[in-house]
Amino acid sequence: PHYAGPIYVLVSSRTASAAELAADALAASGRAILIGEKTKGAMLSQKPFDVPEGLQIFLPIADYFAFHSGRIEGRGVEPDIRTGASEAMTVAIEKAQHADM
């Protein structure tokens, strides 16, 4: 058995990195509806490298391309239902309540 009801994923401008990839994958599956704001668009993997005088520099070592929306870095993931982050939970609850009818 598996859950066959609607899935709502809340996203905001603070949603970043692996959370963006997960949100995009859930949307691409056709099972989830993204609600909120466009995500941050910060998806590059970085690695620290030591530089002189005890400092470190972080450089990108990998880029990710999402199945649903392509390159996320610098672009973010668009929600299906755009609303402010503070209202996203209320919208999701309203949608869930109407889905039961």
Image: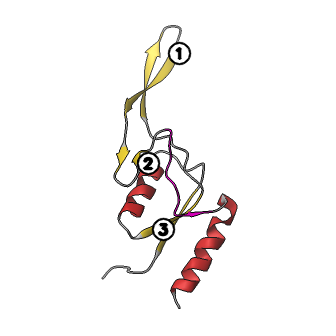
Is 4 positioned to the left or the right of 38 in the image? left
Is residue 4 depicted above or below 44 in this figure? Answer: below
If you read the primary sequence from the N terminus, does the residue marked by circle 2 or circle 3 appear first? 2
Under circle 1, the secondary element is strand
Q: CA distance from mark 2 to mark 1?
A: 27 Å
Which residue is rendered at x = 47% and y = 51% of the image?
Answer: 20
Image depth: mark 1 or mark 3 in front: 3
Q: CA distance from mark 1 to mark 3?
A: 43 Å
Is 35 positioned to the left or the right of 6 in the image? right
Is 82 positioned to the left or the right of 4 in the image? right
What label does residue 33 carry, if any? Answer: 3
If you read the primary sequence from the N terminus, does the residue marked by circle 2 or circle 1 appear first? 2
Under circle 2, the secondary element is helix
81 magenta-colored: yes
Q: CA distance from mark 2 to mark 3?
A: 18 Å
Magenta part of the protein: which range? 74-82
Query: Which residue, as the protein is rendered here, is positioned at the far bottom?
Result: 101
* Rendering coords of residue 75 (x, y %): 50, 43
Query: Which residue, as the protein is rendered here, is positioned at the far top?
Result: 52
Which residue does the numbered mark 2 point to in the structure image?
Answer: 18
* Rendering coords of residue 57 (x, y %): 49, 20
